[in-house]
Amino acid sequence: MKRADIQGLRTVSILAVIFYHIWPTHFPNGFLGVDVFFVISGHLMAVCLANFSGKCCGAKSDKIRNKLFQFYARRVKRIVPMYVAVICGTLSVSRTIMLDSDFQKARFDMYWALAFVANIQPVFENNDYFAEVFSYRPFLHCWSLGVEMQFYLLAPLAMLLLLSLRGLHRRLLRHFFCSTVLLASVIVQQLLTTVMPALSFGLMFCRLWQFFAGILVHFFNTGDQQNEKEANETAETVDQIGWPYVLGHGQQSADQENAINSAISLAPIPAQNQAINASPSTASSPPPVPPFSNASLSIPSSSLSSLAAGQKQQQQQQQEAEEVKNNLVHFLWRSAAAHLLLFLLLCVLFAPIGVPSIVVPFQNTFAVILAAAQLHVHHQQRNGMTAWPASPLLTNFLAVQLGDLSYIWWVVHWPVIVFIKYFFTRIATEKDNDGSLGQRSVTLDTNFTKMIINELQNVESRKRLVNTLSLYEKIKLNELLQSATFEDRYKILPGEERTERWTKQLKQLLVQEGNKTPQNLLKFVIDRKVKGTGNGTVLLVGNSHADVVARELGEEMNAYYHDFQVFTMPGCMPIAMPEHLIPFDPGHIIPCPFFTRTVRNIVEQTKPDVVFMVFRWYNEVLNAPFNENGTTKNDEILKAFRHELRHFQKFVSNRIFVSAPTLQFKHDVAKELAKRLWQHAPLGDLQLSLREHYVTNRFSYARLRLLNCPKCVQFDLAEHFCDARTDKCAAFDEQIQLANFFDNNHLSYLGRQSVRPFLRAIGNQIWHDKRMNV
């Protein structure tokens, strides 16, 4: 049966921790509630394992193993399901509302929490728990549950050892063992506090003394019950001896005692007892007559019995009155002492002021002592009564019910606090530059977004809109910019024609080779043609980066071409690479080799004037080492590029634009920018260092320099978005605070519009080369 006072103590502890997590500066000592929890856990595990260990002592090893398994199974069943559910829910919410950088930290913390070793994570990260309370880490509180689970592994073995101690001095040995472990744990914790504070805070052995304080209380309580049992047995023996023993040991006057002794000596002796009295071995001289008596005292036996009975009744009444008085006094001072202990514990946990620095190393000791005292003074005796009266503050219905839910409170409260703080701490409530509230309601759709962004291309409109867009509108615009082409990516717009010619060829190649690529993947292939006002032919091939920029490229070069053919397939480079460098995902098979063969057929059959190869390089290709100062003829990537481009040059009359490595940002820019604007978080680390970009992709740039392709030109968007003077690549427009990229590498609608001057310059260069017959 659960003790009401323990459930109330749990409520007090969890409230202290919650108050500390919500208002760490107002309740600076609330974290000590965790120490109280550890004392309670140690005590309850001792109570739970006492009977189990007692039954297992001397039992067969199979029985011990079964009991251990049942114990661990109960712990897992009680803790793990709720814990895992909260972790999964917390991670899902974190992904939705957190900045990407904060979410990555949370996901990393989740792995430690799932393994129940979050208590030692700060040791490897050199973090301070009390500083991290002010951060946004939703799994920070899991360290204490890690300590608990590690203690549960140790608790059955410790109790088996303690209860295996037998003999007259078993209580002394148990107390000595618990005290030794307790002192060793305290000493190690204090020694590590100055050297490795993170280790002293979270290491299970450094917290073991708090659990053993609860275990020690259990053995003190069981010792008191044993003493009480012996006292009861003694009282029963006294009752069996009879009233002469009580009378002879009562508080009597000297006159009464002498009179009674004389009466007994002069009373008639039964005949059957005369022989015994006459025996020298048993006879005793009658007591002397008191000196004040002048004659012999003769009292009948009936009068003697009445006198003794009256004296006994009087004595019992006096004892009862004295007992009531003593009980009342004991109740009052014990009740006052119990409430004083609780008051001191509440002061330690909820005091709104920090303790002096000289007391800081001992404040958890105070909390543990007071918690252990609470467990001891309210323990139940063998008669079912509590040793000391419990405070209504702990045993009232509400406190008990809340204590029953303390575990749920514990696992849920910190993620909820983090998300609420995250949501409201930096929320945009101040006014924007135009005086409007940043949270005003406005309806934004795709067409409105396109209109706004197109207006921003004009310098005068840009100046006007920069100061009139509210913060809310900027956030919503960035959310809409997460879509690369606002759902028109695979639509055929006016002036465009879906050819399906090259898609059919791709399907035929797949059938001929027996490839089992799902046909629904082919719906992502873009195969369309646009008519222009010029007389040239332009071919655009590549992966998703090509189809993202296709319409802007086509519009900027409209005066140059008569036919503008687009053929792209997501995930595939248009240059044939060695098979082991092509990414392979069993769940998403992309027929890239067949795509590159189709691209070769298109070039051979259409003989375009200009070819644009816009693509993101495979990671395997980007990361492949390359020594440009060594022998380059053995580099399989460079060899593949040279072979393919040498073949293309035979059919292309003017230029072949080959994509340089794309800009890779650390976060999904549009989504992250919207969150940071909403929370007024720093924006600087969204940008990418140009130097970092070149260093990361140095092998690919080195290969591009050694292509030996006269008709090849490098197509590099870094030239447009990056500034060598500031060493910064613009993930977003700093003036209007809208994203240039909708994820970490694809251009957003704004990015596509802003890149038009770069594409126009390429078109002008092609037109100039054609006129000059270059």
Image: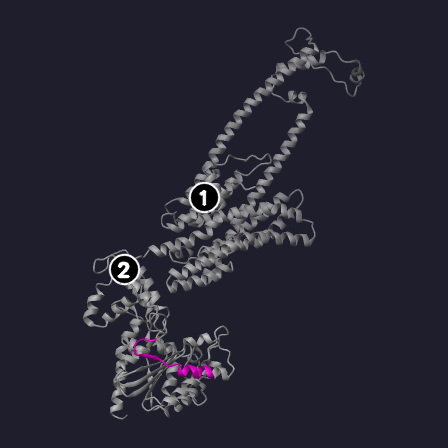
Instruction: Magenta stretch: give its range.
Output: 492-508
Q: Of tags 2 and 1, which is closer to the observer?
A: 2
Alpha carbon separation for disc pair 2 and 1: 47 Å
Displayed quadrant of residue 756: bottom left
Decide whether residue 333 is among the magenta residues: no
Question: SS class of the residue under badge 2?
Answer: loop
Figure quadrant of the C terminus: bottom left
Name the residue rendered at 40%, 89% in the picture: 642
Residue 378 in the image: x percent, y percent? 52, 38
Q: Earlier in the sequence, mark 2 or mark 1?
A: 1
Report the amino acid beneath label 1.
Val
Mark 2: give few (<14), some (14-19) or many (20+) Cα within 10 Å.
few
- Does residue 164 appear anywhere in the picture? yes
| Residue 12: mark | 1
Left or right: 98, with 112 as reference point: left
Figure quadrant of the N terminus: top right
| Vertical side of 101 occupied by 254: above or below | above
Residue 464 in the image: x percent, y percent? 19, 66
Residue 178 in the image: x percent, y percent? 57, 48
| Residue 716: mark | none
Compare residues 598 and 725 and report the one nearer the observer: 598
Name the residue rendered at 60%, 47% in the picture: 49
- Residue on which disc 2 sits: 442
Report the amino acid beneath label 2.
Val
Compare residues 370 and 117 and report the one nearer the observer: 117
Mark 1: give few (<14), some (14-19) or many (20+) Cα within 10 Å.
many
Residue 350 in the image: x percent, y percent? 40, 44
